Image (spheres, coloured by chain):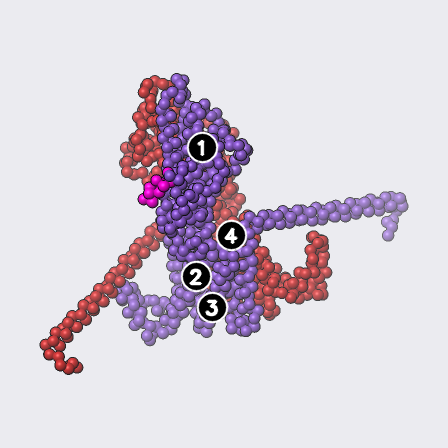
Chain colours: A purple, B red
Amino acid sequence: MQAKGMPLDIMYAMDLDQAKQEQGRLSRGRSWIETFRDNVNARALEFVSNVRKLGRDDPRRVFHSLKVGLALTMVSLLYFCQPLYNSFGVSAMWAVITVVFVFEFSVGATLGKGVMRGLATLLAAALAVGAHHLANVSGRIGEPILLGIFVFLQGKIDYLSIPSLIKQKPKSLLAIAAVVFTFARFYATIKARYEYGLVVFILTFSLISVSGYRDDEILKLAYHRLSTILIGGSACIIISILVFPVWAGEELHNLIASNMDKLASFLQGFGHVYFGMTEDGVSKQDKSFLQGYTTVLNSKNNEDNLANFARWEPGHGRFQFRHPWKQYLKIGARTRRCAYLIESLNGHLNPQAKPEIPGKIRETCTEMSLECGRALKELAFAIKTMVKPFAAHVHIENSKSAAKNFNSLLQSSGLWGDNMDLLQLVPMATVVSLLIDVINCTEEIAESVHELASMVNFEAVESTVPPEKPETGQSKPVKSSDDVQTVIPVVLSL
Amino acid sequence: MQAKGMPLDIMYAMDLDQAKQEQGRLSRGRSWIETFRDNVNARALEFVSNVRKLGRDDPRRVFHSLKVGLALTMVSLLYFCQPLYNSFGVSAMWAVITVVFVFEFSVGATLGKGVMRGLATLLAAALAVGAHHLANVSGRIGEPILLGIFVFLQGKIDYLSIPSLIKQKPKSLLAIAAVVFTFARFYATIKARYEYGLVVFILTFSLISVSGYRDDEILKLAYHRLSTILIGGSACIIISILVFPVWAGEELHNLIASNMDKLASFLQGFGHVYFGMTEDGVSKQDKSFLQGYTTVLNSKNNEDNLANFARWEPGHGRFQFRHPWKQYLKIGARTRRCAYLIESLNGHLNPQAKPEIPGKIRETCTEMSLECGRALKELAFAIKTMVKPFAAHVHIENSKSAAKNFNSLLQSSGLWGDNMDLLQLVPMATVVSLLIDVINCTEEIAESVHELASMVNFEAVESTVPPEKPETGQSKPVKSSDDVQTVIPVVLSL
């Protein structure tokens, strides 16, 4: 339609303008859509590559996910098969819930959670059903029995209040039980290992004593809940043990060894980096091995968890059922103390004016840290392969004699000349003193590794020196087997 | 009855013997029962005293247990009130389950779990119901819509396979979803904060898509589960906020301050203990303050958890909703690094032959650690009371000048005499060098505390020196307010 009193060319121009604006809007719209799509695509690609990396870093994660899928599929048969559904009904979902909550990454964690869930459910169900039953019959035969029990145990409890409490106040019973067991979760020793069991206990007890209010449901609920949880729990446990099992014990074993290995790498490299003497193979830039130890500093939590899980695991591979996992924690604690010292040492690696240090002292210091690193590497290798660490003792002795050597060098005035600056000596003395602390700590680690070795009968293999690339000139060759033979009695007497 | 051919007196003797044995057995039995009862009583008493200690150490634990009981009682009304029971039926147990799993010690943890549980249930229910619905209608109108969506987003997905998959293989859908989301739990950034949400998501999705197989139940299940979870979750959240709330943020705030305080106590005592100079008030045996720092070494996990919980909390007391909790983690990390150094220092406290050290050097070293400890104490006090830490800078400068003083003392040959033993100097030099590292670390901590102070506008109070018992002779008095005034611009320019 044409507006009144408006020249035709203006109208046309307006139309053109509008058309252009329309087009602009459209193209802006399209570009906004395109940007959005590109964004989404880029994000998706980044996400996919992240996920791939996650899977590549540890393929067991992928297997774990598949295992959970398998367990859920198996358990969902309770729903999909008509005969099974007829017998369990809606309660079949408890099996699904059990699988989702119980299936963990390692066998130990799954076993622990599964067994605790089963036992706690059984116990809570028995208690709740029993209390309910007692409340019903307490007038006739329950009271004398309760009387006997309480008189026998304490002689003091106002026993009469309990049955009447159960009978008249199901809500108070529930509340009291919840309060008591919630408080029990704080109980330190329980908290670490049995917390999940307590949660399930509170849950089942609450559910069943609440349902107990409606008589017709209580036994059915208890029975269904228990049987479906057993089905779900055993599906988890069987699959986690049979299909590509991940053993928490083995994880702990490897973690302890690799932590020690990281400290060893630091120490083996430290001397060369501190005195600016790089080996032929190692460029000055490649110092990543110096940062490995930082993960050891905060490993306590991880180790504690793994040891808790490992206690649930049956014998597997090289590990018996009652493998001394506590000893691993002891070794771990000492390794961590060594890591703290290394953290302090690391602060002295930062670029600062290095004092003029005589070549002989440099060599001695380098050897101290090198030999100490070798000892740790040997100990880590011994744990990993479960053979007795003979050569470690030799390396520790070497580093100790290097330390003694340093002391005598320090006192020989000839080395320093007359115009010695004490101020220059301080950083150097600190490094050596920390290294000596590290050596002492390594000796303690070696001691606890030997304890472990005698506890689980590590194999006695004569030469356990791990294959390592030959060091250049300034390092001392590993002592011959003659020395090792003389050391054995010392080691065995530890 | 009398046995044949046996004299009567022997028979009597046998009877007597038997009677004695019988009596002995009885008394053994009674004593066994008594021992057992005594054992049980002793254990019970020990348990009760342990429990009492648990409650006395932190009365909030008792309140927490009572709060859980209150929440459970409230939620159990769904069962006990007939009209409520009529509308929810057996689904009321979801409310109980929610309370048991969601109610945590701190408000932040409860809020986080509650909100995640609600959202994850909503999302999973919507997805599962949607997928189920799509599968039913996909032949008619679903397919074109899906077509549009997938072409728009990617243009590549083989969209046709999805509806048919949902339709024909509910089990595969369930398995695939479980596998995907279980794998997602490994996704590092998700793991720390949203793991619980993912578990609930997997659970709800599995439950509902399993039930989806039986048409009549799916919508009812989704609706009931969602509404009862909302009821249970909000009961938890309301009670945890209104009744004696325990704020994770406040816990973190206090933890960081108290960790710093522990390091300060060590440093303030270190000099006196190392040089064997005990203060009047402190006996040589009372060295418990020297061990306080060990808990700081492994505090990372606790701090991370508290910061995660604190992010969920609304503003409370002195803390806004978006309080910079990350800055606390930064301060915590630096405090921990300082604790590692102190662990190395602590190794030098063990009884060993102390070198003969001139009195002046002793005084300087003692002052270094004392002033550094005061700085840390000031910083801890500033965090706790949320006022700007002016005096900390003064103390740090004092300890730095003491360090410089030490250097010049070391170089003045007059102090040492001619027959100086370098070997005696090494442990001394190590301690001083570590102390200097600690001072540097303290300076970094002070820097991050100042950052925090400017982020959340700490109050500027002129004198913030905490009340502390006066030190004896060898310590320098805290500088007067004149000095503090000159320091303020420096502090503010940080």
Q: Position of residue B88 (x, y in %)?
A: 52, 67
CA distance for labels 2 and 1: 54 Å
Sooner in the amino-acid sequence: mark 3 or mark 2: 2
Q: Are marks 1 and 3 on the same chain?
A: yes
Mark 1 vs mark 3: in front = 1
Q: Residue at x 47, y 57 (%)?
A: A107
* Residue B112: numbered disc: 4
Which element type, helix, strand or loop, lies under badge 3? helix
- Amino acid type at image mark 2: Val
- Amino acid type at image mark 4: Gly
Q: Are marks 1 and 4 on the same chain?
A: no
Furthest residue to the right? A8
Q: Is residue A472 left or right of residue B416?
A: right
The magenta span reads A483-494
Main structural element of the magenta stretch: helix, strand or loop?
helix
Furthest residue to the front? A482
> Circle 2 is placed at which residue position?
A115
Q: Position of residue B408 (x, y in %)?
A: 40, 21
Sooner in the amino-acid sequence: mark 2 or mark 1: 2
CA distance for labels 4 and 3: 32 Å
- Amino acid type at image mark 1: Ser
Which element type, helix, strand or loop, lies under badge 4? helix
Give the camera-side residue of B72 and A365.
A365
Which element type, helix, strand or loop, lies under badge 1? loop
The chain that hosts pointer 1 is: A
Tag 1–tag 3 contact (CB < 8 Å):
no
> Circle 3 is placed at which residue position?
A227
CA distance for labels 1 and 3: 66 Å
Sooner in the amino-acid sequence: mark 1 or mark 3: 3
